[in-house]
Image: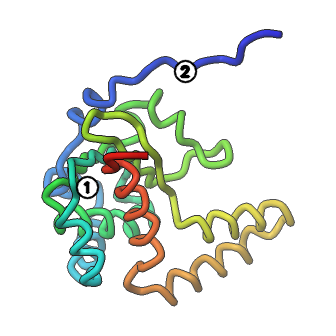
Amino acid sequence: MPRPATLPLLDWKAVFDSGLEYPAWLAAAESAEQREKLEAQRLALTLEPQAAGFLAALPRPVHIVAIAEDWCGDVVRHVPVLQRLAEAAPMLKVRYLSRQQWPDVFARFLTNGGEAIPKFIFLSDRFVECGNWGPMPEACRELISRGKACGDVAAARKKVAARYEADGNRREVVSELLHLVDIASSREP
């Protein structure tokens, strides 16, 4: 029986180092309107004390590669959450890059075979891949998948929009991202 294909190893440190820090990424945004939305979302978001305490006490660095472009609505919703987490955690390091910068990296993180952003790839302090998130919370991805399965993606998108509206402080996203930060910062299995 033939062996399954193996993807080549990535130099995650090189990928991370090629990205931009948030201020530079934001300054390079294609749209001033989207830039303003991103900043308004970031400034409006407050972390619960438990989340802030967890982030402040991370035992070791976590690196996150964020594949994101400002034209995307999900990027505008979710990058501000990631950035707020990074601002609360000295050990959380985030770099932003576009799909075109590393197409071979992005191709590993397609959503149901399609290009969807943002994608956040969580790396340990040794740049070992520990998990990924995106382009939206798990429950929303499931709704979209169900919509595709039954041929009514429009209805699924309405349900996703309702979930976003009901969770203005992005608690669902914060919870999922904190879970991945916890994994990437683990000292033991």
Q: Which residue sits at x=30%, y=68%?
A: 80
Q: Amino acid at mark 2?
A: Leu
Q: Which residue sits at x=66%, y=80%?
A: 159
Residue that carries the numbered disc 1 in the rendered image: 29
Residue that carries the numbered disc 2 in the rendered image: 7
Q: Secondary structure at mark 2?
A: loop
The picture places residue 156, in percent across and down from the top left corner, at 71, 73
Residue farthest along the right direction in this orientation = 150
Q: Residues within 10 Å of mark 1 (few under 14, many from 20)?
A: some
**Decide: marks 2, 1 in contact (CB < 8 A)?**
no
The picture places residue 157, in percent across and down from the top left corner, at 65, 73
Dividing the picture into quadrants, the one containing residue 13 is top left
Dividing the picture into quadrants, the one containing residue 81 is bottom left
Of label 2 and label 1, which has the lower sequence position?
Answer: 2
Residue farthest along the top direction in this orientation = 2
Quadrant in which the N terminus is drawn = top right
- On screen, residue 129 versus residue 20, left or right, reads right
The picture places residue 139, in percent across and down from the top left corner, at 62, 70
In this orientation, does residue 45 appear?
no
Q: Nearer the viewer, mark 2 or mark 1?
A: 2
